[in-house]
Amino acid sequence: MNFGFEKNGDIGVISFEGDLSSRHIDDIRSVLLLSMSSTNRIVLRLDDATNVDSSCMQMFCRTIRASKKLFKTIIMTGGRSRELSLMTDDNISDCRMECSSCPVECVRV
């Protein structure tokens, strides 16, 4: 797994490449925290991610929920971004996917 973080004004772009699995969760958490603390708008580029396992999906989902509470904007592109966007909604902070089809373990299960 590789990632890059670029900051341009108030926008941070994180580009992920390769396998996003639980063994990389600490690095992923670190770059997400860095971007959340230094920008208000974040783009997560998953275009070159070859695999995103459930632990990383959970991390992204938690980050999206936290960003809403902090009035920050996260936009995801590529990879499983559509699946993640189904889990959250701008009007609610809770997941809106059916638990039986969700790849993420959460408090609702």
Image (tube, rainbow, N blue to C red):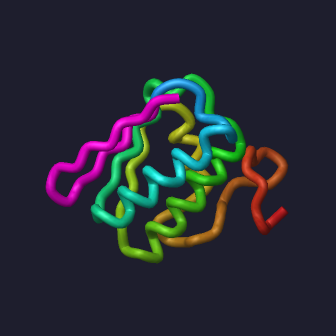
Place residue 41 in its image quadrant: bottom left
Count of number-bearing discs? 0
At horizontal 80% and vertical 54% (from top left) the residue drawn is 99
Q: Using the image as rendered, state which of residue 91 and residue 93 is in the foreground.
A: 93
Compared to residue 96, the image places residue 24 above or below, namely above
Residue at the left extreme?
A: 9
Compared to residue 14, the image places residue 1 above or below, namely above
Q: Using the image as rendered, state which of residue 69 and residue 91 is in the foreground.
A: 69
User: Residue 62, percent across and down?
Assistant: 59, 61
Q: Is residue 13 magenta?
A: yes
Magenta stretch, overall SS: strand
At horizontal 66% and vertical 52% (from top left) the residue drawn is 58
Q: Which residues are magenta?
A: 1-16
User: Residue 47, percent across and down?
Assistant: 44, 28
At horizontal 20% and vertical 60% (from top left) the residue drawn is 10
User: Residue 1, percent across and down?
Assistant: 53, 29
Q: Using the image as rendered, state which of residue 44 and residue 24 is in the foreground.
A: 24
User: Residue 3, percent across and down?
Assistant: 42, 35
At horizontal 35% and vertical 37% (from top left) the residue drawn is 4
What is the quadrant of the C terminus in the image?
bottom right
Compared to residue 32, the image places residue 40 above or below, namely below
Q: Is residue 71 magenta?
A: no
Place residue 101 in its image quadrant: top right
Q: Is residue 71 left or right of residue 7?
A: right
Q: Is residue 89 left or right of residue 72?
A: right
